[in-house]
Amino acid sequence: MKWLSTLFWMFLFLLVVLFSIQNRDSVALRFGIPFMAEPWLETPKVPVFLVFISGLLVGLLVSGFSDLYRRYQLKRTLRQNRNLVEELRKEIDALRSSLPHRAPFPQEDL
């Protein structure tokens, strides 16, 4: 199974290299209100593949942090539920011990 993962990553790397070779044209990114003459922000010219790959990396980081936060929430909820279960078990044991002791029902052989 390890070789399949390695093969997948090699194929993905090859696709990124091919994409990078084919998209070397430079572009300047601008941000501003369309009807204003000057944009608020303008980057120096960078290759298109850097813009694309940077967007992918930012998306991976955002989704990674989102996943970490969700895992933290789930672990906290799990810990709270385990504590609740333990408290309820203690309560059940206390209630059972407060009941008068009765002899168990006789077991009949069938």
Image: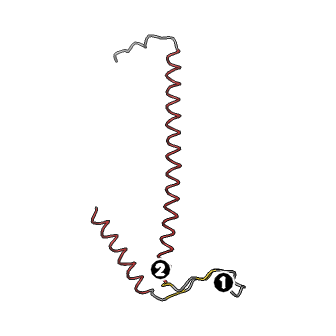
Secondary structure state at the residue bearing disc 2: helix
Could you tell me which residue is drawn at 53 percent across and 59 percent down?
66
Mark 2 → mark 1, Cα distance in angstroms: 21 Å
Secondary structure state at the residue bearing disc 1: loop
In-image side of 8 versus 23 (left or right): left
> Is the N terminus in the top left, top right, bottom left or bottom right quadrant?
bottom left
Relative to 55, does residue 86 appear above or below in the rendering?
Answer: above
Residue situated in front as seen by the camera: 32 or 93: 32
Disc sitting over residue 84 in the figure:
none
Q: Are there few (<14), some (14-19), or many (20+) residues within 10 Å of tag 1?
A: few
Residue occupying the far right of the picture = 35
Across and down, in percent, residue 65 comes to 51, 59
- In the figure, residue 39 lies in which quadrant? bottom right
Across and down, in percent, residue 107 comes to 38, 15
Tally the marks: 2
Could you tell me which residue is drawn at 48 percent across and 66 percent down?
60
> Is the C terminus in the top left, top right, bottom left or bottom right quadrant?
top left
For disc 2, the marked residue is 50
Could you tell me which residue is drawn at 48 percent across and 89 percent down?
25
Q: Earlier in the sequence, mark 2 or mark 1?
A: 1
Q: Are marks 2 and 1 in contact (CB under 8 Å)?
A: no
In-image side of 96 versus 33 (left or right): left
Relative to 110, does residue 48 appear above or below in the rendering?
Answer: below
Across and down, in percent, residue 4 comes to 30, 66
Disc sitting over residue 39 in the figure:
1
Q: Are there few (<14), some (14-19), or many (20+) residues within 10 Å of tag 2?
A: some
In-image side of 21 versus 54 (left or right): left
Q: Amino acid at mark 1?
A: Pro
Q: Amino acid at mark 2?
A: Leu
Could you tell me which residue is drawn at 34 percent across and 74 percent down?
11
Across and down, in percent, residue 41 comes to 63, 80
Residue situated in front as seen by the camera: 100 or 85: 85
